Amino acid sequence: MNTLQKITLFLLLMVPMLGTAHNPDQSYIYLRVYEFNGIEGKFDCHVNDINAALGIDLDKYATDEEFEKHLGRLQAYLLEHSAFSSKYGKHKVIFTGERTRIRTTTGYFWNLQFYLDNMETVPDELTVTYDPFLEDDSNPQQNMLGMEYNWKAGLINNETIFALDFSRDGTTQTLNLVETGLWKGFMAMVRQGVWHIWIGIDHILFLLALILPSVVRRVRENAEEVGDGNPKLAGSKWSWKPVARFKPAFIYILKIVTFFTIAHTITLSLGALGIVNLPSRWVESIIALSIGLAAYHNIRPLFNSKDWVIAFVFGLFHGFGFASVLGELGFKGEYLSLSLFGFNLGVELGQVVIILMIFPVLYFIRKWKLYPKFMLWLSILLIVVSLYWLVERAFEINLPVDDYIRKEGYKIAVYLGLR
């Protein structure tokens, strides 16, 4: 698949179609290494492996209630078949009680959270033994260990790069924790910032609503001047006039993005520091609303000659959205300044790429007679999308339209040979 086809597929589906690293013949340990909080982790076990090891018969998509009946036995089994040690001695697995399910096409993986004790100081090397589900010689089972989070190793939210593998011939391996560096961690945060602005369709649509009027200027038609030189509003109407030169349009974009950046930098820092925490339901709902209001401003101005107000005010809430992303990545405040700077830099670089993709096209077509209508109807579409997401997020319901679009988009992609 060439680059153009990949871009086309992305536009068709409108959402990232992310794969999963989970395979039915594998069991996983994911570790999260923190500079001051020790090592946390999780076991990921497929329901088929659990059935074979415990001699039970859970359904392919067993419910939480069915799983709970066998939780104690599974925990005891995993404790018996796993061990961690270092120069500081043995590190006992302590289950936190948190557990989730990961659904794949082959059934569920059950996720059990834990932490290692005796971790006042993170060791340079960790010796790991992990041999569950290897009893059946006919089963091509392989166990894997991945570093889900290790800031200085440049691993953030990682579930695809594995550090160790365990088989019947090698159930004990040594994990090196010192092949790290501040630069790796910083660049990992930059990449996460870029990635999360690119996959944040709501952030992209908000930027699009702000960019649309950058290549035109709103003017009054048939307006009579009064004594103070201001246009007389009675009997006049708004119209759009294309900008004559590149520079004014560029300055407009620069001003808007600057205010958006300042705003979300403030709240990203406040959220990451734990100074201000807003319910994610509110934040995500307001982010959805911001798209519609920015688009409505293109139809009927809300702030006359002060477009930056929308970018700044709603940029504050987009910043809280970015802060929640840091929490999902496993960020717990280590290397705070570098992390915030790197993530924010990544967001800005991602924004620049988006603007460079959209702005030249808009500047090229700004003189088309149909551009005002194009902007109008695209703004209306953005309002509809905004209201749809607002209802979903505010009332915490899943409406079927986006699932239908993804399904039909996939069919189109298959028809065009993109999948």
Image: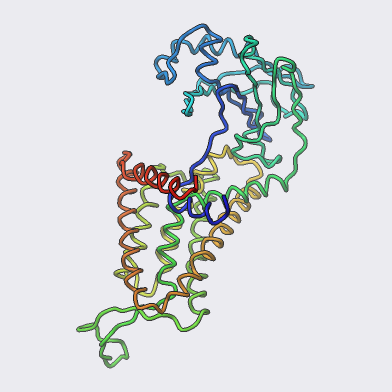
Is 382 situated above or below 136?
below
The image shows residue 344 at horizontal and vertical percentages of 58, 54
Is 88 situated above or below 293?
above
The one of 108 and 178 positioned closer to us in this rendering: 108
Is 217 situated above or below 82?
below
The image shows residue 165 at horizontal and vertical percentages of 69, 25
Is 265 situated above or below 400?
below
Q: Which residue sits at x=76%, y=30%?
A: 176
Extreme residue in the bottom direction: 227
Count every numbered label the image shows and give the total.
0
Extreme residue in the right direction: 87
The one of 116 and 44 positioned closer to us in this rendering: 44
The image shows residue 346 at horizontal and vertical percentages of 59, 54
The one of 360 and 382 positioned closer to us in this rendering: 360
- Indicate the quadrant where residue 87 lies: top right
Extreme residue in the left direction: 235
Left or right of 47, for residue 291: left
